[in-house]
Image (cartoon, rainbow, N blue to C red):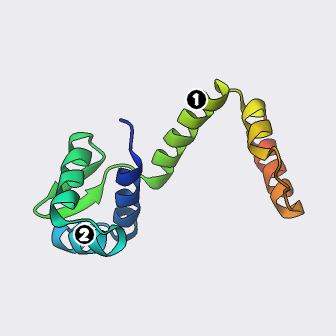
Amino acid sequence: MEKIFESEYRFLSILWEHEPIASPALVALCNQSLGWKKSTTYTVIKKLTDKKIVKSENTIVSSLVTKDEVDHQESEELLQRTSNGHIPTFLAAFLKDRKLTKAEADHIRQIIDTAEE
C-alpha cells in the first residue's frame, strides 16, 4: 500500500464512517468537517483511487482498505523510523515521562502475553 498522508487519512476517516457514500454527500461532509472545497475533495478521491485505496463507481465512493490495515501500516512505519523496528526501544521512548494507569498497564501486559511466541 502506498503512503497515506495526513490529509488523506482525515478524508478516509470520514469515508470509513459513512461508506459507501455518493460523492456529492462526501463533498458536503468534507466541507463541513475539513473545510475543503469541492475540488479538493475530488482531487483526494482521484489520488486515492490512483493509489488503489478507494474506488469511485457511478458517483459512489468506498474504501478498498480498512482503517485497521492503514493504522497497522502507519504503526510499522513509525516503529521502523523511530526505533529501527525494535519494539522495546520504541516503548521505552514512548513511555518516557508518562505514567500508566493500572488498567492501561494490565492491557499492555495482556497484549504482550498474546503476542509472545
Residue at 81% in and 43% down:
96
Residue 58 percent across, percent down from the top left: 10, 62
Residue at 76% in and 48% down:
111
Element class at badge 1: helix
**Gap in angstroms between the C-alphas marked 2 and 1:** 33 Å
Residue 5 percent across, percent down from the top left: 39, 45
Q: Quadrant of the N terminus?
A: top left
Residue at 31% in and 76% down:
32
Name which residue type carries label 1. Arg
**Residue 117 seen in this snapshot:** no
Q: Quadrant of residue 63?
A: bottom left
Q: Are marks 2 and 1 in contact (CB under 8 Å)?
A: no
Q: Characterize the local packing of mark 1: few (<14), some (14-19) or many (20 or more) Cα atoms within 10 angstroms.
A: few
In terms of depth relative to the viewer, which is nearer, 53 or 84? 84
For residue 63, side relative to residue 6 (left or right): left
Residue 106 percent across, percent down from the top left: 86, 56
Q: Quadrant of the C terminus?
A: top right
Q: Earlier in the sequence, mark 2 or mark 1?
A: 2
Name which residue type carries label 2. Leu
For residue 44, side relative to residue 39 (left or right): right
The residue beneath circle 2 is 26
Element class at badge 2: helix
Mark carried by residue 81: 1
**Residue 116 seen in this snapshot:** yes
